[in-house]
């Protein structure tokens, strides 16, 4: 009987009932030790099993908190026979976790995707409940994997419950439930079977402060010893109670309990193998088992409550703990298990032990368990007698911490390593980590300078550090860093056309810079992953929409195929920007929605904010001012040009030209970023705002730069916009005509429509009303297709002024695709292309059931009933 838990039980019952009905979900039970979380999990497991649900369960163990994937092994060991049914990259990731193979896992989030797929596959046979107790003690790799799966549950018939202490195990995005303390009535009911006199009962209730475990333990203690004294806090009182019980046991029993607490996983054979070296046997557990402190089966030892294990461990003297950990290390067959105990058994530098820890760290990193690898490298550094080797291991620890997403920890470790060694070679190895942390923290120029200074001191580092330095310098607006990186690469015989091209751009030498970027694009089409990445960024700088779209789509496809979940949000971001330029707003929103969801699920908070620049641009085009301003508010400084561009477009559309021009003049600023394609594209807005104000001179300088950039790059859309700008300033019709002609070869419908609108205005003012009407109708058609409401209104107003009395505001014709959510749109397109549900799930990092759930919801919206009918629709 659980007293005072009706609210919590109702929430848990609702969760499991939802899973049985096909609605997945996850819940976090958070509260202090002893508040009853485990009891709630036990009751939920019993109820679920009785209803036919399969139950998987794992309990975090404090000694294993730093053992890579220790919790996940415990959870998935009973179902490892199901791995063969997973997509190969996911199956390999879980095989590595379970120790069947050790292939390197390239992305630390791939394991989470594999867990999601495996749980969904298991749920195909019936609803599934996953229970995680003491989640605050899960290793980081397990936590990341389980939380990734939990956040992406939808229609898989899976319920997940995490029980955790108040501290630790941050789980943003999941519903939390905090079990309350018991009131007096429930406390009395709980104590009823103990037979306490009223005075003692009231005293126990007061001391326990409504904590159920404290009520039970204090009640039993006071019944057996009415004069017993307990410390002040509830946690200390409970621990003290357990220490008292343990202290009353025979010495060998206390030692056997210490082995169980130090080993942590409940592996009875390992514990007994180690314990025999200190003269302890299985029979020495009997007294503890009779006292109800542990439960022993043929192969496991489980403490009745984790605090009992804590009391057994903390109550032992240091020498005993060291001896026990050494015995466990010597008895372990698994090298990772041995590596967990060795640092706890070693009190002075020992290079042999440090080398074993480094090997364990490398194995953890191969499985993408970077947080565990970082700790192992730190432990190895502590036990390393040679100072230079110690610094190398601290550097490796910092690198792993950065890969785990712990930038602050990486910074601390790098600084510790730097203080330990003034050697140039050591500092050079540290520089990439320190620079990456600085860049992520907003110190972009300092990061670039550090890498270039480091390379100057140790030129044997290779070209990669210079390329990174050039990139940091570019985003920092530090022209000197970009030039210096290009010069050094050339002096090494490693001239990089992208870096060299960027160096010419910062000197406004477009005629030399853009052809080099074209070379980088061509070289990357069939090159390495790194070359293709450079090609993509070169195409963006060139304004080569066709190449950039193709390369961005290929990068997204590569991330999907290889399970590079952590890299996918950035790839989708770049693709979404290209989709906006192509007028594919719904596609861009779908890309951003997926990127935001993955970035949130993987803790990439700054990427979530940065992604807001894309829908902000769409909202600006469509005239949704409130949404645009809300989105821009969160865009970080590095995305300032995109944010200011969106806001200025809003102001331009409503005729606030001074505000638009002032904003763009401020946003453009000096430095390399002014040459980015987004910044170059805003020149047209500057020119239009300046001309409308009668101050065209304010835009003359950026316009000349844009014209030079457009001529050197030879992109039709850019040349068209350049002619439009010149036509606005000089009023020559031949420029308008050439702009219209070039737009016929381009890929930017919004710019094409703006050119047609301005040319139509010019024709109307020239009293060529018939020609004006034809041109303005073309603009209106494009604007309506883009849902660019304020711009469409301008086109209609011009049409009416040109004598088109039939033109009036009308509702935009509905596209059936607009009825779909972004994720439904992605799913139906892939399904229409002939992909199976499992193939779609693998590409979108979802489960098969979730894919079919989206199809089920999409079919009636589209007026179809099957995949065959779906294939007949125009889904462009």
Image (tube, grey):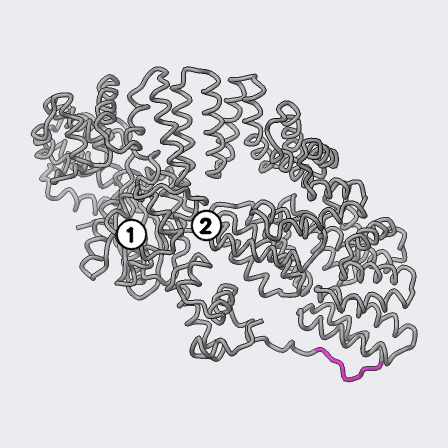
Q: Answer above or below: position of 174 versus 230.
A: below
> At x 37% / y 63%, what residue is drawn?
155
> At x 83% / y 56%, what residue is drawn?
687
Q: Secondary structure at mark 1?
A: strand
Label 2: how many Cα within 10 Å (few below 14, some 14–19, many 20+): many
| Towards the viewer: 27 or 68 | 68
User: Residue 686, image x and y in percent?
Assistant: 81, 54
User: Residue 198, image x and y in percent?
Assistant: 13, 38
Q: Is residue 497 left or right of residue 859?
A: right
**C-alpha span from label 2 to label 1:** 19 Å
Residue sitting farthest toward the front:
493
| Towards the viewer: 593 or 573 | 573
Q: Answer above or below: position of 227 versus 518.
A: above
User: Residue 387, image x and y in percent?
Assistant: 46, 16
Where is the C terminus found, in terms of image quarters? Answer: bottom right
Q: Quadrant of residue 332?
A: top left
Residue 232 among those drawn in magenta: no
- Dot 2 or dot 1: first in sequence order is 1
Q: Answer above or below: position of 425 versus 154.
A: above
Q: Which range of residues does the magenta coloring cover?
A: 803-809
| Towards the viewer: 84 or 791 | 84
> For mark 2, what is the residue?
601
The disc placed on residue 130 is 1
Q: Secondary structure at mark 2?
A: helix
Q: Main secondary structure of the magenta part?
A: loop
User: Residue 36, image x and y in percent?
Assistant: 25, 44
């Amino acid at each position: 009987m659980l007293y005072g838990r009706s609210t919590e039980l109702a929430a848990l019952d609702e969760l499991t009932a939802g899973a049985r009905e096909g609605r997945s979900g996850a819940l976090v039970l958070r509260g202090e030790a002893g508040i009853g979380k485990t009891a709630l999990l036990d009751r939920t497991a019993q109820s679920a099993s009785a209803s036919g649900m399969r139950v998987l369960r794992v309990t975090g163990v404090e000694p294993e908190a730093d053992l890579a994937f220790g919790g996940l092994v415990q959870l998935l060991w009973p179902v490892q026979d199901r791995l063969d049914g997973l997509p190969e990259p996911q199956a390999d990731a879980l095989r590595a976790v379970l120790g069947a193979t050790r292939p390197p896992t390239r992305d630390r989030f791939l394991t989470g995707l594999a867990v999601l797929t495996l749980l969904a596959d298991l749920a195909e046979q019936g609803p599934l409940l996953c229970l995680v107790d003491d989640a605050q003690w899960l290793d980081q790799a397990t936590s990341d994997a389980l939380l990734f799966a939990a956040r992406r549950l939808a229609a898989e018939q899976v319920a997940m419950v995490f029980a955790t202490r108040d501290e630790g195990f941050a789980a943003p995005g999941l519903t939390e439930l905090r079990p309350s303390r018991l009131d007096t009535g429930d406390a009395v009911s709980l104590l009823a079977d103990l037979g306490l006199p009223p005075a003692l009962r009231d005293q126990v209730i007061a001391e326990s402060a409504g904590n159920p475990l404290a009520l039970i333990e204090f009640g039993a203690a006071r019944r057996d010893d009415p004069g017993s004294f307990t410390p002040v806090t509830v946690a200390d009182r409970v621990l003290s109670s357990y220490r008292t019980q343990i202290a009353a046991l025979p010495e060998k029993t206390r030692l056997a309990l210490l082995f169980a607490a130090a080993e942590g996983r409940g592996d009875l054979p390992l514990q007994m193998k180690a314990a025999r070296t200190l003269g302890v046997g299985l029979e020495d557990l009997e007294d503890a088992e009779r006292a109800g402190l542990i439960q022993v089966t043929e192969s496991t030892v489980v403490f009745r409550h984790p605090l009992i294990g804590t009391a057994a461990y903390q109550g032992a003297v240091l020498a005993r703990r060291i001896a026990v950990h050494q015995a466990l290390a010597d008895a372990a067959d698994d090298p990772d298990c041995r590596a967990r105990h060795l640092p706890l058994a070693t009190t002075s530098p020992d290079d042999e032990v440090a080398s074993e820890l480094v090997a364990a760290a490398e194995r953890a990193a191969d499985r993408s368990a970077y947080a565990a690898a970082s700790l192992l490298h730190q432990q190895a550094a502590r036990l390393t007698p040679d100072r230079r080797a110690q610094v190398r291991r601290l550097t490796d620890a910092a690198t792993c911490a950065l890969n785990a997403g712990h930038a602050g920890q990486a910074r601390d470790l790098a600084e510790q390593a730097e203080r330990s060694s003034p050697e140039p070679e050591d500092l050079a190895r540290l520089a990439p980590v320190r620079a990456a942390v600085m860049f992520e923290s907003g110190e972009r120029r300092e990061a670039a300078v550090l890498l270039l200074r480091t390379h100057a001191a140790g030129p044997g580092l290779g070209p990669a550090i210079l390329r990174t330095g050039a990139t940091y310098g570019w985003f920092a607006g530090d022209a000197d860093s970009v030039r210096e990186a290009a010069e050094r690469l050339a002096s090494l015989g490693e001239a990089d056309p992208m870096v060299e091209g960027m160096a010419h751009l910062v000197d406004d030498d477009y005629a030399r810079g853009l052809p080099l970027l074209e070379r980088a694009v061509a070289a990357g089409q069939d090159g390495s992953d790194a070359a293709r990445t450079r090609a993509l960024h070169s195409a963006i700088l060139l304004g080569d929409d066709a190449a950039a779209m193709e390369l961005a789509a290929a990068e997204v496809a590569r991330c999907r195929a290889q399970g590079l979940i952590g890299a996918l949000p950035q790839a989708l971001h770049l693709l979404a920007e290209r989709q906006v330029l192509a007028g594919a707003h719904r596609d861009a929103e779908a890309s951003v929605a997926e990127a935001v969801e993955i970035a949130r699920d993987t803790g990439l908070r700054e990427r979530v904010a940065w992604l807001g620049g894309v829908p902000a641009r769409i909202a600006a085009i469509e005239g949704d001012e409130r949404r645009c301003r809300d989105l821009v508010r969160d865009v970080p400084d590095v995305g300032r040009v995109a944010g200011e561009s969106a806001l200025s477009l809003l102001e331009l559309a409503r005729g606030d030209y001074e505000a638009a021009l002032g904003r763009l003049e401020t946003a453009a600023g000096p430095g390399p970023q002014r040459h980015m394609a987004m910044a170059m594209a805003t020149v047209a807005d500057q020119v239009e705002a300046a001309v409308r104000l009668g101050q065209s001179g304010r835009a003359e300088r950026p316009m000349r730069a844009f014209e030079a950039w457009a001529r050197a790059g030879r992109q039709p859309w850019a040349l068209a916009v350049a002619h439009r700008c010149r036509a606005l300033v000089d009023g020559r019709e031949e420029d308008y005509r050439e702009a219209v002609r070039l737009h016929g070869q381009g890929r930017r419908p919004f710019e094409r429509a703006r050119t047609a609108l301005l040319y139509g205005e010019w024709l109307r003012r020239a009293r060529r009303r018939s020609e004006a009407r034809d041109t303005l109708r073309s603009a209106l058609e494009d604007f309506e297709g883009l849902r660019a409401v304020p711009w469409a209104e301008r086109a209609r107003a011009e049409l009416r002024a040109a004598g088109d009395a039939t033109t009036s505001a009308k509702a935009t014709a509905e596209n059936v695709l607009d009825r779909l959510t972004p994720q439904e749109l992605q799913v139906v397109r892939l399904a229409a292309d002939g992909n199976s549900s499992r193939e779609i799930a693998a590409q979108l990092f979802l489960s098969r059931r979730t894919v079919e759930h989206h199809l089920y919801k999409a079919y009636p919206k589209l007026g179809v009933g099957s995949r065959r009918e779906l294939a007949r629709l125009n889904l462009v």
